[in-house]
Image (cartoon, rainbow, N blue to C red):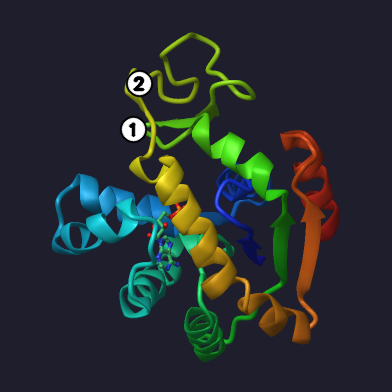
């Protein structure tokens, strides 16, 4: 099963994609996490993209398309994938179609998580994650069971993302509206796009998504 999750920053794509990965045994490809891993390990691409990411702008399409093309063919994606954070532009969506078609694959579901912008600003401001395994938390809605300790890997380095600062958040919303929303009509025209109400609680959003996946 091949799935794309779309939605503005803070809409819960990462949280829901991790759940789909578990329930469907498919691989979770989160381009933001891949880029953050590159910057943390100091690769050449990581150094090139760090400033772009911190300011909330998009990394060039060519880098992203190559990154996904290399990943999608790995054995762990043999049963399918859930894309979280890709595609973010029309050229990325077109390149994805092309790379899937070449391999005789297609998209089963494209799901957009719809949320209210004011609520998103609140979510992003309180969000933090584990530097070790990427598990995400929120100061009010989703705290770790033990204060300061990751539930998943028991690491103690819980960090806020630099691009969750208010000015970077504003830039990321603007980028979403201007560059990512135009891909919605692209998928709608192909009849694969469905939307879910992202204002429900985390389990409520999961139930809506599972109903679509069938
Ligand atoms: P995310 O973790 O999905 O919010 O992504 C964090 C940042 O990584 C974004 O604000 C972009 O700077 C960059 N990024 C992630 N995915 C993409 C993509 N598909 N295209 C361009 N930039 C991306």
* Residue at screen point 33% across, 56% down: 53
Q: Is mark 1 within 8 Å of ligand 1?
A: no
Is residue 137 something one can see in this rendering? Answer: yes
Characterize the local packing of mark 2: few (<14), some (14-19) or many (20 or more) Cα atoms within 10 angstroms.
Answer: some
Which of the two labelled residues, at mark 2 and mark 1, occupies the earlier sequence position? Answer: 1
Q: Which is more toward the observer, 170 or 110?
A: 170
Q: Which is more toward the observer, 93 or 123?
A: 123
Q: Quadrant of ligand 1?
A: bottom left
Q: Which is more toward the observer, 207 or 180?
A: 180
- Dot 1: what SS? loop
When asked about the image quadrant of residue 206, the answer is: top right
Characterize the local packing of mark 1: few (<14), some (14-19) or many (20 or more) Cα atoms within 10 angstroms.
Answer: some
Q: Determine which residue is flagged by label 1.
A: 131
Is residue 29 something one can see in this rendering? Answer: no
Q: Position of residue 38 (x, y in %)?
A: 24, 54
Quadrant showing the N terminus: bottom right
Q: Which mark is on residue 155?
A: 2
Q: Is residue 8 above or below residue 177?
A: above
């Amino acid at each position: 099963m091949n799935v794309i999750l779309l939605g503005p920053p803070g809409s819960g794509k990462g949280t829901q994609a991790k759940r789909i990965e578990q329930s469907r045994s498919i691989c979770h490809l989160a381009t933001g996490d891949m880029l953050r891993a590159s910057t943390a390990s100091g690769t050449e691409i990581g150094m090139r993209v760090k400033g772009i990411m911190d300011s909330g702008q998009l990394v060039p399409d060519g880098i992203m398309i190559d990154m996904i093309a290399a990943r999608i063919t790995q054995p762990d994606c043999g049963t399918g994938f859930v894309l979280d954070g890709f595609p973010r532009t029309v050229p990325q969506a077109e390149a994805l179609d092309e790379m899937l078609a070449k391999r005789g694959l297609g998209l089963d579901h494209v799901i957009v998580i719809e949320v209210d912008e004011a609520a998103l600003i609140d979510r992003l401001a309180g969000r933090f994650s584990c530097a070790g395994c990427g598990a995400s938390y929120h100061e009010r809605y989703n705290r770790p069971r033990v204060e300061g300790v990751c539930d998943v890997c028991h690491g103690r380095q819980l960090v806020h993302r630099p691009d969750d600062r208010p000015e970077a958040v504003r830039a990321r919303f603007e980028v979403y509206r201007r560059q990512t929303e135009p891909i919605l009509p692209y998928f709608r025209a192909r009849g694969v796009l469905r939307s879910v109400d992202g204002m429900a609680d985390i389990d409520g959003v999961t139930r809506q998504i599972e109903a679509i996946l069938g």
